[in-house]
Image (tube, rainbow, N blue to C red):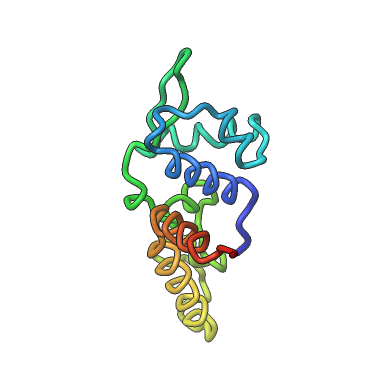
Amino acid sequence: MKISTKGRYALRMLLDLAEHQNDGFIALKDIAKRQDISKKYLEQIVPIFNRTDFLKANRGFQGGYQLSRTPDKYTVGEILRLTEGSLAPVACLEQDPIECERSGECATLPVWQGLNRIINEYLDGITLQDILDQEKERYVNDYMI
């Protein structure tokens, strides 16, 4: 499994919105500038989230985007599944039930199932708020006299 640029940038975009959640609607150009991501690329990512309840949009002069939920209600796992599709480490685990003709005698299937479980549990256990808190803690402990 390799996370694409789309998945990484989507996570950064939503983190930026979480960090600025008290600033009202945030324009994509502002996110693009802060995150050093092309605005055009963000414009390709936004429709993925517009089809869900992830974002609120506002058009016009004060237009932009906001998270529709609090940052503790977004997991990294759900964000990456929306942008990447399946997070399964092997193709046969992308279907449930497994449709592989060899699954009954596949000696390695339990290995891949275990890895898949660990990946999903790990990513579903991290919220946007957790990442913000971790960043805040990092900067609090990064001072010089």
Quadrant occupied by the C terminus: bottom right
Residue 23 rendering spot, x and y as whole percentages: 41, 32
Residue at image coords 51%, 82%: 111
Q: In the rendered image of this protein, does residue 22 appear above or below residue 63?
A: below
- Residue at 45% across / 74% down in the picture? 118
Q: Is residue 120 left or right of residue 40?
A: left
Q: Quadrant of residue 18?
A: top left
**Residue pictured at 47% horizontal, 65% vertical:** 99
Image spot of residue 9 (x, y percent): 59, 46
Q: Position of 63 compared to 6: left or right?
A: left
Q: Position of residue 90 (x, y in %)?
A: 56, 68
Furthest toward the bottom, the residue is 107
Instruction: Judge by depth and name the residue closer to the eye, 133 or 142.
Output: 142
* In front of the other: 86 or 17: 17
Query: Which quarter of the rendered picture does the N terminus lie within?
Result: bottom right
* Residue placed furthest toward the top: 60
**Residue nearest the viewer, comparing 101 with 47:** 47
Spot occupied by residue 119 in the image (x, y as percentages of width and height): 48, 69
Quarter holding residue 127: bottom left
Q: How many labels sit on residues?
A: 0
Residue shown at the point (46%, 75%) measured from the top left: 113
